[in-house]
Image: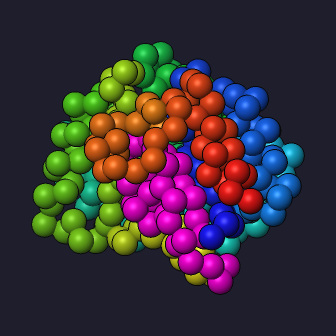
């Protein structure tokens, strides 16, 4: 069965280790779109943080962002939004008070005040570059829970790998863990980890599945490419899952097809082999 939709993670997959889009990936995605294949960027990034990547392609894209909490077109039309109840968000912040330097609260807002931190350290060696790239969208509020005047999209914890794993374990075992979902992303080589708290039942995979149903297709029509823990549900859902050569060991152990690394144009190689080559 030919591929009708290609679902692509961004960081560690579509982009190389310097967060650049390889020309081979850009060409392969554009060729797939020109042949009628829908391209979906499926990412933990916010919409406005993902759009600089989307704008590098000469074709319209479906944007499944915030680890599945929102779907938009690359033209800005909102297709689906799932919000985290503010009461649940407040309980999450209370339960993780000892890690209060890590979280930010993300809202579905145009422009400024999309991401609220309790304190922004512009010189933070781990998060400083992210702060500077998103300067126009972020703000401070202390204590952080006072920003919860509306339901957010998610709470995002960022820090070292060990900090992220500790927060994930804490929230996985909380007495109200059924009221939210977790999406973890780990970059061992950078000692950087993220844990997103998103609406219950939400993931890259569940939202991709809903989007495919709306299109009148099935999972057998979908090819997905990813590299990290938060891609697991998406890859399980896809009829044709492909893991990157630089994937975390847990994904490589599942026996799926493997392409080249993100520094070697692995996305282009997979598209050419499994999507374009099959047409």
**Observer-nearest of 229 and 266:** 266
Residue 18 against residue 46 in the figure, above or below: above
In which quadrant of the rendered view does residue 205 lie? bottom left
Q: x, y (%) of residue 73? A: 74, 62
Camera sees residue 256: yes
- In which quadrant will I find the N terminus? bottom right
What span is colored magenta in the figure? 215-243
Residue drawn at x 70%, y 28% as measured from the top left:
22
Horizontal side of residue 240 vs 221, given as left or right:
left
Q: Report the label total.
A: 0
Provide residue 263's location: percent of width, then percent of height: 57, 24
Residue 94: x %, y % from top left: 23, 54
**Which color scheme did the rendering employ for the protein?**
rainbow
| Residue 179 falls left or right of residue 53 | left
Residue at image position (51%, 59%) is: 240
Residue 149 in view in this figure: no
- Would residue 249 be counted in the magenta stretch? no
Depicted 221 relative to depicted 276: above or below: below
Q: Residue at x 15, y 60 (%)?
A: 174
Tell which of 93 and 194 is nearer to you: 194
Of residues 50 and 216, the one drawn nearer to the viewer in this rendering = 216
Image point (45%, 33%), residue name: 245
Q: Quadrant of the C terminus?
A: bottom right
Quadrant position of residue 221:
bottom right
* Residue 179 x/y as whole percent: 28, 71
Q: Is residue 238 above or below residue 114?
A: below
């Amino acid at each position: 069965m030919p591929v009708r939709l290609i679902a692509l993670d961004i960081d560690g997959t579509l982009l190389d280790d310097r967060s650049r889009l390889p020309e081979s990936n850009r060409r392969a995605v554009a060729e797939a779109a020109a042949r009628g294949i829908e391209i979906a960027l499926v990412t933990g990034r916010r919409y406005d943080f993902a759009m600089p990547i989307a704008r590098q392609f000469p074709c319209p894209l479906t944007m499944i962002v915030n680890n599945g909490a929102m779907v938009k077109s690359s033209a800005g039309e909102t297709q689906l939004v799932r919000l985290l109840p503010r009461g649940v968000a407040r309980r999450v912040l209370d339960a993780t008070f000892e890690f209060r330097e890590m979280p930010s609260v993300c809202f579905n807002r145009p422009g400024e005040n999309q991401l609220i931190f309790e304190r922004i350290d512009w010189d933070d060696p781990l998060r400083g570059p992210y702060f500077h790239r998103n300067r126009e969208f972020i703000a401070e509020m202390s204590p952080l829970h006072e920003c919860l005047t509306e339901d957010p999209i998610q709470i995002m914890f960022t820090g070292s790998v060990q900090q992220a794993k500790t927060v994930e374990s804490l929230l996985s075992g909380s007495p109200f863990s059924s009221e939210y979902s977790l999406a973890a992303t780990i970059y061992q080589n950078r000692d950087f980890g993220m844990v997103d708290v998103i609406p219950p039942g939400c993931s890259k995979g569940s939202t991709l599945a809903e989007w495919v149903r709306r299109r009148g297709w099935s999972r057998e029509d979908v090819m997905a490419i990813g590299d990290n823990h938060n891609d697991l549900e998406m890859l399980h859902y896809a009829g044709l899952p492909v893991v990157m050569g630089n994937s975390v060991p847990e994904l490589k152990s599942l026996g799926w097809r493997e392409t080249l690394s993100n520094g070697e144009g692995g996305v282009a190689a997979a598209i050419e082999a499994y999507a374009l080559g099959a047409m």
